[in-house]
Amino acid sequence: MKVEAQFEEAILKRFFSGMEFSDQREEEVFFSYIRGFSILFFDPSVKNIVEIGGGQSTAIFALMAERFGCKVSAIDMNPEAIRNKVRNAKICDKIFKDVHFLRGVSISRSDLDAYYAQSLVSIGGVPVSRVIEAADEFIDTSMDGRKEAPVLKALNIASLDAGLLEGALVNNGRFPQPLLDLFRCKDDEFDFQSTAETSEGLLAGILEQGEVDMVFLDSGEFSSLPEWEIVSRKLRVGGYVILHDVLFPKSFKNWLVCASIMASPEWKVIYFDRSNPQGLMVARREK
């Protein structure tokens, strides 16, 4: 066993003993969280953390709150559902003790609808053409290629390369509906926000109230892009963003967010983990 794997197994045994994983891939994702989040352990300026959507990752943030005195806030429509994700009563008790849950949505339904109805000119302040040029880094079918053929059909292109994507990904200024439909699922954010259409989004207000040091973007397939428009404007210089589900076409969630970071002079990529089909990236705002 490699030294890194021994280290991760030791952390799992010491701090998260008893946590259950549904399969090996879920365990690999948790180890990816450990690797990515550990970067924050060595930056004493990280004191205020915001997570969007709770899950097994919240257990690690709860540990940071307990050991380093961090303030951790999690935006979640249904915090109690975390018990079904962590599957360990003792760890869940620590989570609810050390994490402040904000029951609600990160962005409003009207903001979500408006984002996908608008003419898309830029992502995080970076022109779409430059974002797509940087997107090759986040296209990977080697570990999970199940959606490759349906995506090619939806976009009517022969392969997933930046040259073809630039003409097909944003059709008439908008994402092609067949592509979005491919990543829709029952009870996604378009569904659950239909029951909370008047709910105000919480993310912008949190970032405006005080100096947030890190934001973890890991909500729905379609929420991350409009969330990123908020974070990219309001996160402080020196602050971090961590992104999960960064590889396309496994996920639509964060690959273009990551590409916009890669193409922006305002951000620096600190860590990029592509050890599993979902991937994870850590970046810091430089200016």
Image (cartoon, helix red, strand yellow):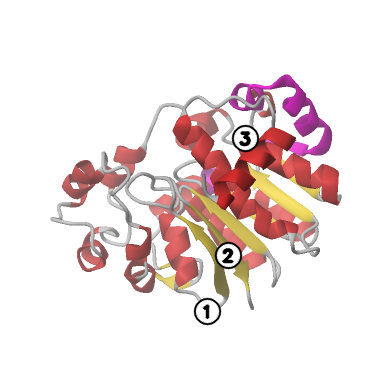
Residue 283: image tag: 2
**Within-10-Å neighbours for mark 2: few <14, some 14–19, many 20+:** many
Q: Residue at x 35, y 39 (%)?
A: 183
Q: Secondary structure at mark 2?
A: strand
Q: Position of residue 4 (x, y in %)?
A: 57, 51
* 276 within the magenta span: no
Disc assigned to residue 265:
1
Q: Could you tell me residue 105's position as x and y percent?
A: 62, 39
Dot 3: element: helix
Which of pointers 1 and 3 lies earlier in the amino acid sequence? 3
Tell me where residue 87 appears, x and y as whole percent.
Answer: 63, 22
Left or right, 138 with reference to 285 = left
Circle 1 — which element?
Answer: loop
The magenta segment: 82-111
Which residue type does callout 3 highlight?
Answer: Gln
Q: Magenta segment, principal secondary structure?
A: helix
Q: CA distance from mark 1 to mark 3?
A: 32 Å
Q: Quadrant of residue 171?
A: bottom left
Instruction: Using the image, tell me which numbered label, if any, was put on residue 254.
Output: none
Res. 107 in view: no
Residue holding disc 3: 56
Q: What's the distance in space between the residues labelled 2 and 1, CA to CA?
A: 12 Å
247 sits left or right of 242 in the view: left
| Front position in the image: 173 or 270 | 270
Figure check: 132 above or below 225: below
Determine if residue 116 is in view: yes
User: Which residue is at 49% across, 75% downward?
Assistant: 264
